[in-house]
Image (tube, rainbow, N blue to C red):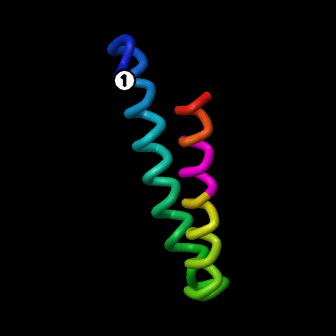
Amino acid sequence: MFKSIGLFIQFFFFFTVGLIGFLFFLYFVIPLIGLKPFIIICTLLLIGFILEGAHKMFK
């Protein structure tokens, strides 16, 4: 899956930073816009990520 340990460390670093950022984002944004629009946005993003991943896999 990973060509080298460096790539793995880079992936892990970005994943961790992204996760922490996402949790902060949740903490601040949900009280502002409410839960329902947030769920809709998340669903759209998730579909987008899945389509992007599938596109890269079959390229």
Q: Position of residue 41 (x, y in %)?
A: 64, 72
- Which corner quadrant of the image does residue 16 belong to? top left
Q: Residue at x 36, y 19 (%)?
A: 2
At 59% from the left and 33% from the top, the residue drawn is: 56
Query: Can you tell which quarter of the image residue 15 is in?
Result: top left
Horizontal relation, residue 19 to residue 45: left or right:
left
Residue occupying the point 55% across, 41% down: 53
> Is residue 6 found inside the magenta-colored segment of the image?
no
Left or right of residue 58, residue 19 in this image:
left
Taking depth in this image into account, of 1 and 27 the one nearest to the observer is 1
> Are there few (<14), some (14-19), or many (20+) residues within 10 Å of tag 1?
few
**Element on which disc 1 rests:** helix
Up/down of 11 relative to 21, above or below: above
Residue 46: % across, % down: 55, 60
Looking at the image, residue 5 lies above or below residue 36: above
Residue type of the residue flagged with mark 1 = Phe
Percent position (x, y) of residue 48?
63, 55
- Left or right, 14 with reference to 4: right
Q: Which residue is mark 1?
A: 8
Query: Residue 50 colored magenta?
Result: yes
**Span colored in magenta:** 48-53
